[in-house]
Image: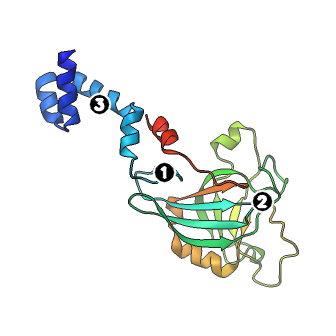
Amino acid sequence: RLFLIFIATFIYASNLIDAYRFYGIKPTVNEIEKKLTSTDYWLNRLKNKDVRWGYYEDKKDILVCIKDEKTLEVLKNKKNGFDLIDKIDVLTGLDGDKEKEGDLKTPIGVYRLKSILENVDKFYGPFAFETSYPNMLDRLKNKDGHGIWIHGKPLKGNRDNNNTKGCIVMDNDKLEKLKNEINYRNTYLLISEITPLTATKEEIAKILA
């Protein structure tokens, strides 16, 4: 027991070289792994961080779409949290989570922006962001469908109605601005019906541990 206390003391003091010199690699690694699987360790590490939108060790931009409010918030990842830099009025599909092709609903979940589609029909505005729907969780739930985009409005004429068939739609000038505000390759899109999809420090610490 005294042996383990000595190892822990070395490691907690960040003196890994001495821990390795005196006790070898296996006890050192075991103690590190024990620490990394401790919820308390991660709670302490997250103490001053805003993890409502998740925990990222590299910078990510976050888009938060609340379907009931018809808004898309643009969040930039800073050192200890996220700054709201824009809030955009949008149109979305029918209420409820997307389940199948053709149900005209905007999915609820967390998605990546896969690409920018430049050569789209003029009905969709100047370009579109392609999302990663369906993601792995959607597939496990046997959801189908495809072509969920963030796009603009017709370059000529007007939309006949507010039904987006499941996409997220905004004014074209807002779409152009959004393109300059984010790095789409490092952007997550969080879509919810009413309450934003947020997490607590305890939930994130448990996952990391």
Secondary structure under the numbered disc 3 in the rendered image? helix
Instruction: Look at the image and tell me whether residue 118 can be seen.
Output: no
Question: Identity of the amino acid at label 2?
Answer: Gly
Is residue 68 something that shows in the picture? yes
- As drawn, which residue projects farthest toward the top? 1
Q: Tag 1 or tag 3, which sits nearer the N-term?
A: 3
Q: CA distance from mark 2 to mark 3?
A: 46 Å
Q: Which mark is residue 16?
A: none
User: Which residue is labeled 3 in the image?
Assistant: 32
Looking at marks 2 and 1 on the same chain, the residue that comes earlier in the sequence is marked by 1
Question: How many dots with numbers?
Answer: 3
What residue type is disc 3 on? Ile
Where's residue 95, x and y in %? 81, 55
Q: Mark 1 packing: few (<14 Cα in 10 Å), some, or many (20+)? A: many
Which quadrant holds residue 120?
bottom right
Quarter of the image with the N terminus is top left
Residue under the image location 23 percent in, 22 percent down: 27
